[in-house]
Amino acid sequence: MRTIEIISIPVTDQARAKEFYQKLGFEVIVEAPFGGGSQWVQMGFPGQDASITLVNWFPKMPAGCMQGFVIKTNNVEDDIKELTAKGIEVGTVDNTPWGKFLTVKDPDGNGLSLHSS
């Protein structure tokens, strides 16, 4: 094993979720039909190997169940201003001995944590 390649994020509406993740800076890598009426939507940050896919076909993985997905960022205070300007609701900054964390929820309630030193 070498690296994490794709993380599945459970969503109800892929188009709505895609728009949200694009506001966070993700870009579409692949968007294509993939059998049984399902759509494959894979996204990632520019220049990064790890990516996400917006899924709605895993019965034991309901939309909104993903919590603790951590995204490294340069400055959570700057992120608050930027995301608020884009209409994204953010939580409060949690200062810990290992850095600052800012909670953001996607349209389905999946919890993302932005982290800076």
Image (tube, helix red, strand yellow):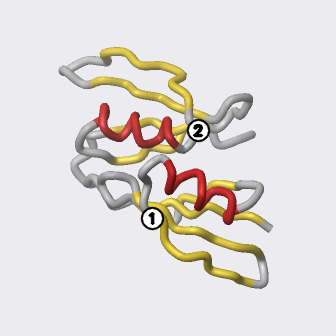
Residue pictured at 56% horizontal, 36% vertical: 26
Image location (x, y in percent) of residue 37: 19, 20
Q: Position of residue 54 (x, y in %)?
A: 39, 38
Near mark 2 (Cα within 10 A), the count class, few <14, some 14-19 or many ≥20, is: few
Residue 75, image quadrant:
bottom right
- Check disc 1: other Cα within 10 Å, few if <14, some if 14-19, many if 20+: some
Camera-nearest residue between 90 and 101: 90
Give percent across and percent down for residue 41. Answer: 41, 27
Q: How many marks?
A: 2
Q: Quadrant of residue 34?
A: top left
Instruction: State the image coordinates of residue 83 (x, y, percent, origin top left).
Output: 53, 53
User: Where, quadrant-wise, is the N terminus in this rendering?
Assistant: top right
Estimate the spatial distance between the alpha carbons at disc 1 and disc 2, rounded to whole Å: 19 Å
Q: Which residue is mark 1?
A: 67
Residue at 70% in and 73% down: 100
Determine whether the residue tagged by mark 2 lies in a helix, strand or loop. loop
User: On the rendered structure, is 91 left or right of 115?
Assistant: left
Q: Which residue is mark 2?
A: 25
Q: Does residue 52 sit above or below 28 in this rendering?
A: below
In the rendered structure, find residue 56 and report the number of the disc placed on it: none
Q: What's the amino acid at mark 1?
A: Gln
Lower sequence index among marks 1 and 2: 2
